[in-house]
Amino acid sequence: MSSAHPEAAKSNRGARRRPRPVDAAQHPWHLDLVSREVSPPETAAIDAIVVPTAREVSALDNALDLAAQANCSLIVLCSRKADAAATADAARHKGVMGVVPVDVGAGVRLPRFQTTALLTDKAFVRRTDTAGKRNLGLAISRMVGWQRVLFLDDDINEIVIDELTAGAALLDRYGAVGLQNDGFADNSVVCHANRDTGGEQGTFVGGGAMLVSVARITSFFPDVYNEDWFVLLNGSQLIDVAMSGTCAQTRYDPYADPDRARQEEFGDCLAEGIFSLLDNQVPLRAADATFWEKFLARRAEFIDSIVQKVPSTVPPVTSTADWTAHVLEALKASKRSLAEISPELCVEYLATWRQDRRTWRRYLRTLPRLGTPREALEHLGLEVGDELPPASSPSSRP
């Protein structure tokens, strides 16, 4: 997600700029790539909200309330501590209609991506299922015929419904519209540490609170950190993306578990490298082994510079007593992962990702048109338990 840069309101993705030299360095901001839309005059109905969740049911309170306000379907994709039956009970208690909770386990009928297989035995392989759940959301939306869908994480709150429907109207012009995060920043562990030690650090549009035009999204969420940046790429460049409305992410401790930094490092390097090229209006074909060799070296220097600042940094007021030790341990985990990343792996991953994009587009063409989310989920190999009566259809809403 995105926090406002002082110049963000002046930026316009459509403005033509001269290409800048390839500097192979991580940039603190990418907001020149996003159009800032302030108070759009029109509104549009949202067809559905998709929530990938692994937390206990109380984390869904905001999503349930928002679905009731939007009078739209709510697809809740549950695993780990999340439970479909408990979700259905919570929705009944609140009187929210149109909730489809489902426990996501093995046997889901989605394509097997070679990018996932490529990283299976690597030190930085992820142990989350968020990307797969978001791909389920895209597939369900295609089958049911939804046009405007909100991807929402269960730790996002303070969304104003009028701002949300105004953002939905922008999907007539944009492939995705992200809400500006005015809460706790949505960054990698390394970028959090950069900010906390006084470095300039922004954020970007993310899948935690992102409206998508289903017809315009032809990519998928790869199983890698920053998967929500990759879904916005059409293979060679960024699709048209806007930022409108606000939300707030709940505070968490990014340094509590060093394993978080380990899992993030590969995806963070890839995304930051690619988006540095986009910032400079350089084609993604420039991301060759020579580019990645330079970028990875600069990334190592970047992390080392943060490490040097940590001991003299006054911990944030909300930090734990062992903040300094936790930050250093997390950064060490990032450096260990970084040492396993080669320029050749980055090149191979992007080539494989392009192949997976073709696989995904072929898969989308095979999906049938179905009448309900239940039918779509069953087609994907998932058993739907309790389903509440549907919300009104988009065509019947004012």
Image (cartoon, rainbow, N blue to C red):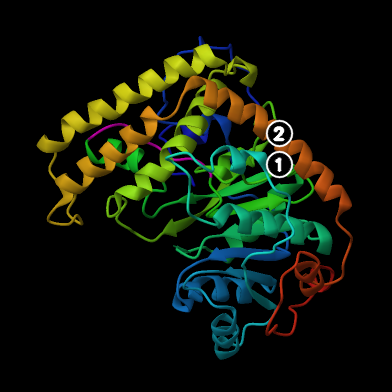
Considering only vertical position in the picture, is 273 above or below 247? above
For label 1, the SS is loop
Q: Is residue 115 left or right of residue 214?
A: left
Can residue 43 be seen from the camera position used here? Answer: no
- Label 2 belongs to which residue? 234
Q: Quadrant of residue 161?
A: bottom right
Which segment did they paint magenta? 198-205
**Mark 2: few/some/many CA within 10 Å (<14, 14-19, 20+):** some
Q: Quadrant of residue 385?
A: bottom right
- Label 1 belongs to which residue? 219
User: Going from the N terminus, do you reach mark 1 or mark 2 first?
Assistant: 1
Q: Amino acid at mark 1?
A: Ser
Can residue 18 be seen from the camera position used here? Answer: yes
Q: Is residue 17 left or right of residue 363?
A: left
Residue sitting at x 59%, y 30% = 349
Q: Is 364 in the magenta?
A: no
